[in-house]
Image (spheres, grey):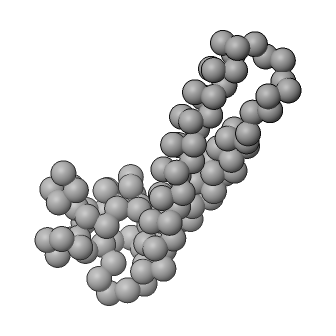
Amino acid sequence: MDKAQVKQTILEEISKTEASIEHYKELTKPISPNDAIGRVSRMDAINNKSVNEASLRQAEIKLNNLKRVWSKIDDTDFGICLKCKQQIPVGRILIRPESLLCVNCAR
């Protein structure tokens, strides 16, 4: 396994996820009732806000998982599936660095 490439991928994903979290936080700010955007537009804004809040929660979960993986990258069992104890393919780690399970166990 090329640990340098995996480390770089994890750091890039952490950076992108942190940027996404900041973006979603901006989009999920409360909608002021004083804004004259109309009833239908306000309902659309509230709906969009709830979709963005769900995306924010997912991004925060992903960031936590990435940080957990990053803290274990130098462990001897890094890249080992938590469930079946088999080696997780490097391709999966590069695509989903926050993965702690192999493809079969993640299903």
| Residue 60 in which image quadrant | bottom right
Q: Residue shown at 54%/34% (left/top)?
A: 51
Q: Nearer the viewer, residue 101 or 12?
A: 101
Image quadrant where one finds the N terminus: bottom left
Task: Give percent across and percent down for residue 15.
Answer: 62, 58
Q: Residue furthest bottom?
A: 76
Residue 34 falls in image quadrant: top right
Q: Position of residue 77 (x, y in %)?
A: 29, 83
Q: Residue at x 48, y 79 (%)?
A: 71
Q: Is residue 98 above or below residue 17?
A: below
Count of numbered circles on the image: 0
User: Is there any visible trace of residue 9 in the rendered image?
Assistant: no
Residue 87, position as x, y percentages in the image: 21, 71
Residue drawn 18% across the image and 51% down it? 107
Residue placed at 84% from the left, 18% from the top? 36
Specify whether 49 is left or right of 57: right
On screen, residue 29 versus residue 76, left or right, reads: right
Q: Can residue 17 be seen from the camera position used here?
A: yes
Q: Is residue 49 above or below residue 18?
A: above
In this rendered view, identify the residue nearer to me: 99 or 5: 99
Q: Nearer the viewer, residue 10 or 50?
A: 50
Q: Nearer the viewer, residue 96 or 40?
A: 40
Measured as percent of width and height from the top left, residue 2 is found at 39, 70
Q: Is residue 32 above or below residue 71?
A: above
Q: Is residue 67 left or right of residue 74?
A: right
